[in-house]
Image (tube, rainbow, N blue to C red):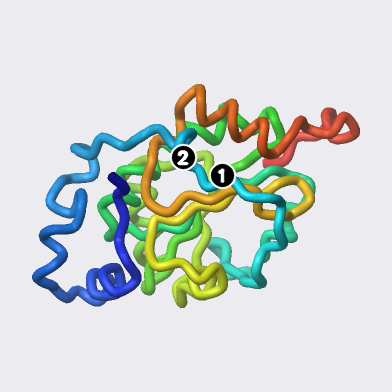
Amino acid sequence: MRFGLSRRQFAALGAGLVLPDLTSLAGIGKSAEAMELPDVAPNLDVTVPQPLPDFHFLDAFGRRLTLAHFRGEGLVVNFWATWCPPCRAELPTLVALNPRIRGDGIRVLPISVDSQGIKAVRPYYAKHHITGVPILLDPSSSALDAFDVNGIPFTVIVDRKGQMVASLQGAGDWNTPATIAQLRKLIGPKPAAASGTTAT
């Protein structure tokens, strides 16, 4: 069973609407804390390396970024929202994952699709004491359109050449030994030339 919200459902939730079929959505009746997420490793959709679609997002200061800004690093790019229960359940596992893979030259980039942008995400980070991962924003959900996906959470794995090598539709537990081992295998070792530098 996968925990996630379809585009129609998350648009309705984001707008504050109540839809009858939301009550039957897997996980929607549970708090984020009550969800038991599956290990990501066996559920990753691994693919041959392929180019990423063009999209941009914003940092907490409103600066426009693309994934090209992180070229040379492995990336775990997660699209989520503060009002999405499966996303809220998954995010702590991504936050916990980040320090375990930073030494490998891999980083977690959580990109919020909250329509209110920084006004929704900054207080959420503060309330839940989220540190170590940046605030990144895509209030228009343009990235989801670019990837042609139906809902959130949605995560893509990007190798050091900037190509997508795997993805996950729905929520999972990223902070497991099997998942970490698979990420390292998919992205590859940190280049020797970069071993003496540490990005923040």
Residue 169, image x and y in percent?
43, 54
Q: Which residue is mark 1?
A: 108
Q: Is residue 144 left or right of residue 20?
A: right
Mark 2 Cα-neighbour bin, 10 Å: few <14, some 14–19, many ≥20: many
Contact flag, marks 1 and 2 (Cβ < 8 Å): yes
Residue 101, image x and y in percent?
61, 31
Q: Quadrant of the N terminus?
A: top left
Kind of element beneath mark 2? helix
Kind of element beneath mark 1? strand
Residue 24, image x and y in percent?
13, 58
Residue 112, image x and y in percent?
44, 61
Quarter-wise, where is residue 66 in the image? bottom right
Q: Would you place residue 34 above or below residue 25 in this image?
A: above
Q: Amino acid at mark 2?
A: Leu
Q: Would you place residue 148 above or below residue 176 in this image?
A: below
Mark 1 Cα-neighbour bin, 10 Å: few <14, some 14–19, many ≥20: many
Quarter-wise, where is residue 36 in the image? top left
Q: Is residue 96 left or right of residue 124?
A: right
195, 74: nearer the viewer: 74
Q: Amino acid at mark 1?
A: Val
Q: Would you place residue 165 above or below residue 16 in this image?
A: above
Q: Is residue 77 visible?
A: no
Q: Earlier in the sequence, mark 1 or mark 2?
A: 2
Q: Which residue is mark 2?
A: 94
Q: Is residue 11 visible?
A: yes
130, 39: nearer the viewer: 39
Q: Is residue 155 left or right of residue 106?
A: left
Q: Quadrant of the C terminus?
A: top right
Residue depicted at x 16% and y 64%: 22
